[in-house]
Image (tube, helix red, strand yellow):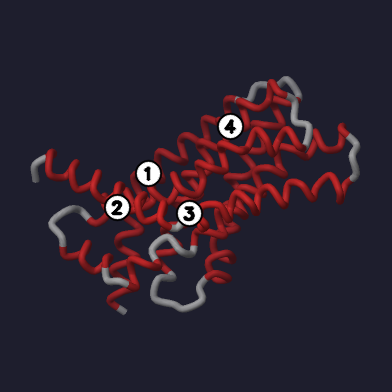
Amino acid sequence: MSHAPLASACAAMLRRDLTLAWRRRGDIAMPVLYALIVTTLFPFALGPENALLQRIAGGAVLVTMLLAILLALDAMFRSDIEDGSIEQLMLSPQPLALMLGMKILAHWITTALPLIVIAPLLAGMLHLPAPVMPVLVYALLLATPLLSLLGAVLVALTAGTRRSGMLLALMLLPLCVPVVIFAAGAVAAAQQGLPWLAPIAWLGAALAMALVLAPLACAAALRIALDA
């Protein structure tokens, strides 16, 4: 297969999904509003003590981001399954894994990227020191696509079931624990003035592996779920 038609198909798929997401702008705003509301509640629940808020800021923002992404994860392939787009992709000459990779990228751009943009604001509300902000952003830039890739595989596995949101949460949360631990560890190390590159490197290695394996697993899971 020539590279030019394949690149055009990938660009068309990404453009299609971004256009559809833009038409449903309210869905994009929901995770952002959720993250803002949850982060605002921490000072009310724990009190206004700056030292305490600084200590929990990194972990609180990361967990809030995880839950906000989880809210939108269930809808990743739902409309495409309902309108038959996934079946058309399976019959197309382009590799299904690559097309699904474009869909996962579009979902990350519309769901996680706005959260990363407001992450410094959320961390500032919890008095995270300014020098630590770049480390938090680096961690989110690696952790959020990894969560989207892991979530896409589980969404594909539960594609044939109705009301799979709770099942998806139960399956995904244990897989998210190592991601949150490494990301929060990098932020905590930066707060204490310790080296923080090692946790970031582990996240990068996990992301590189997921970029290769997750779309393939997602394609195989969708084939099994829709053939069942």
- Asked whether the residues under the numbered discs 2 and 4 touch, taking CB atoms below 8 Å apart as contact, a structural biologist would say no
What is the spatial separation of the Cα atoms under label 4 and label 1, in whole angstroms?
20 Å
Q: Residue at x 17, y 53 (%)?
A: 94
What is the spatial separation of the Cα atoms under label 3 and label 2, in whole angstroms?
15 Å
Give the answer, above or below, for where 218 lies relative to 204. below
Q: Amino acid at mark 1?
A: Leu
Q: Residue at x 57, y 34 (%)?
A: 139
* Sequence-earlier tag: 4 or 3: 3
Which residue has dot 3 on it? 25
* Sequence-earlier tag: 2 or 1: 2
Q: Amino acid at mark 2?
A: Arg
Which residue has dot 1 on it? 211
Q: Amino acid at mark 4?
A: Val
What is the spatial separation of the Cα atoms under label 1 and label 3, in whole angstroms?
27 Å
Using the image as rendered, state which of residue 130 and residue 227 is in the foreground. 130
Q: Which quarter of the figure has residue 160?
A: bottom left
* Sequence-earlier tag: 4 or 1: 4
What is the spatial separation of the Cα atoms under label 4 and label 3, in whole angstroms?
24 Å
State whether residue 215 appears in this view. no
- Asked whether the residues under the numbered discs 4 and 3 touch, taking CB atoms below 8 Å apart as contact, a structural biologist would say no
Which residue has dot 2 on it? 16
Q: Residue at x 38, y 63 (%)?
A: 77
Q: Which quarter of the figure has residue 34?
A: bottom right
